[in-house]
Amino acid sequence: DTGVSQDPRHKITKRGQNVTFRCDPISEHNRLYWYRQTLGQGPEFLTYFQNEAQLEKSRLLSDRFSAERPKGSFSTLEIQRTEQGDSAMYLCASPLRGHPARSNTGELFFGEGSRLTVL
Amino acid sequence: GQNIDQPTEMTATEGAIVQINCTYQTSGFNGLFWYQQHAGEAPTFLSYNVLDGLEEKGRFSSFLSRSKGYSYLLLKELQMKDSASYLCAVRDRFSGGYNKLIFGAGTRLAVHP
């Protein structure tokens, strides 16, 4: 158990509907990352937050996607007007807190993911 | 940008040793990670290399050669539970966010009795 919780674990929706995923990281982590993983592929970076600020967005994140981290704790990822190509596992990840110069290797701890199926 | 290559699939026998290779290209290398991912589960951290050489952790070892852009993960005394995907990931100092990792597609390892 990495302490990173995601909800819902599974979501089945019809094309064109909106969906929202939530991530609750370990409270002391100031960075939070979202990744997407499709079958047979590795996780692909979507976006990350430093506290409440969204500092980088991938080109994969079209204008139908929006992510927030309003109080620098939990985060949400919303997909509007879902398409079948959005079907994937959406993973949230959080690193160990600490300055890079210390023993922190900076690995990411992943939540169990939210699996989206768009019919 | 970054490019990470690893074999798609490998098979091995229980009790044997298997080596999973990874080659990468990145403009500002700042560490290489190996993760294990069982089907339907989240990736879990296995190892980290930032300097050249071998890092050993029980049955798992990871090697890095920065000049060659090459790493391998060595799994010894294979067990059935080692059947999983193994993901190679690099961190790039020029790619925003100290903890941002770029993953390869993963190597699916099947361990047979």
Image (spheres, coloured by chain):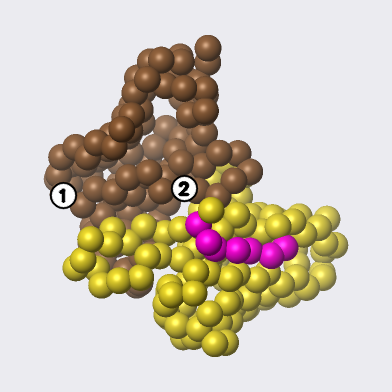
Chain colours: A yellow, B brown
Residue positioned 82% across, 69% down in the render: A16
Q: Is A81 placed left or right of B106 in the picture?
A: right
Q: Which residues are magenta?
A: A2-8
Q: Nearer the viewer, mark 1 or mark 2?
A: 2
Q: Is A39 placed left or right of B59 in the picture?
A: right
Labelled disc at residue B7: none
Marks 1 & 2 on one chain = yes
How far from the left and from the top, in percent, is residue B91?
A: 31, 59
Mark 2: which secondary structure? strand
Residue to which mark 2 is pinned = B44
Whichever of labels 1 and 2 marks the residue nearer the N terminus, that label is 2
Residue to which mark 1 is pinned = B51
Circles 1 and 2: CB atoms closer than 8 Å = no
Q: Would residue A118 be visible to someone looking at this image?
A: no
**Dot 1 alpha-carbon crowd within 10 angstroms: few under 14, some 14 to 19, many 20 or more:** some
Whether A5 is among the magenta residues is: yes
Q: Amino acid at mark 2?
A: Thr
